Image: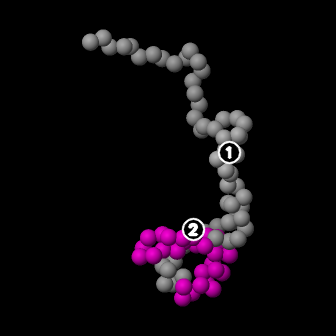
Amino acid sequence: MSPVKTWPVQDAKARFSELLDTCLVHGPQMISRRGVPEAVLAPLGQWQQLVSQQKTLKELLLVSGGRYDFDLPERGQQTHREIEVF
């Protein structure tokens, strides 16, 4: 897949068929307004995959296993800092 191309909204409107063909061949295409990215046109299959991966808050909270991407040290293995007495 090639890098995402950014289409100014005027070009996207004037050349929509070309934008759609490019999206289907090369993947998602960014659409900008006044130089600010505003939207993405993505192939239907990719969009459906993204939507199917969404989970509700309840589903996320009920997931078994870890929910964090960091390792916690074993209990009792932490180093303690000394307390300063004033």
- In this picture, residue 65 sits left or right of residue 6: right
In percent of width and height, residue 45 lies at 73, 68
Residue 1 x/y as whole percent: 64, 67
Q: Which residue is mark 2?
A: 3
Is 84 situated left or right of 79 in this image?
Answer: left
Residue at figure coordinates x 67%, y 60% from the top left: 50
For discs 2 and 1, the disc positioned in front in the rendered view: 1
User: Circle 1 is placed at which residue position?
Assistant: 58
Residue 40 in magenta stretch: yes
Q: Residue at x 72, y 36 (%)?
A: 64
Residue extending furthest toward the left = 86
Q: Residue furthest top?
A: 85
Residue 58, located in which quarter of the rendered image?
A: top right
| Badge 2 amino acid | Pro
Q: Which residues are magenta?
A: 13-41
Say if residue 6 shows up in the picture.
no
Relative to the observer, which residue lies in front, 25 or 44?
Answer: 44
* Disc nearer the start of the sequence (2/1): 2
Q: The disc labelled 1 sits on which kind of residue? A: Lys
Graded by Cα atoms within 10 Å as few (under 14), some (14 to 19) or many (20 or more), the crowding at tag 1 reads few
For residue 17: magenta? Answer: yes
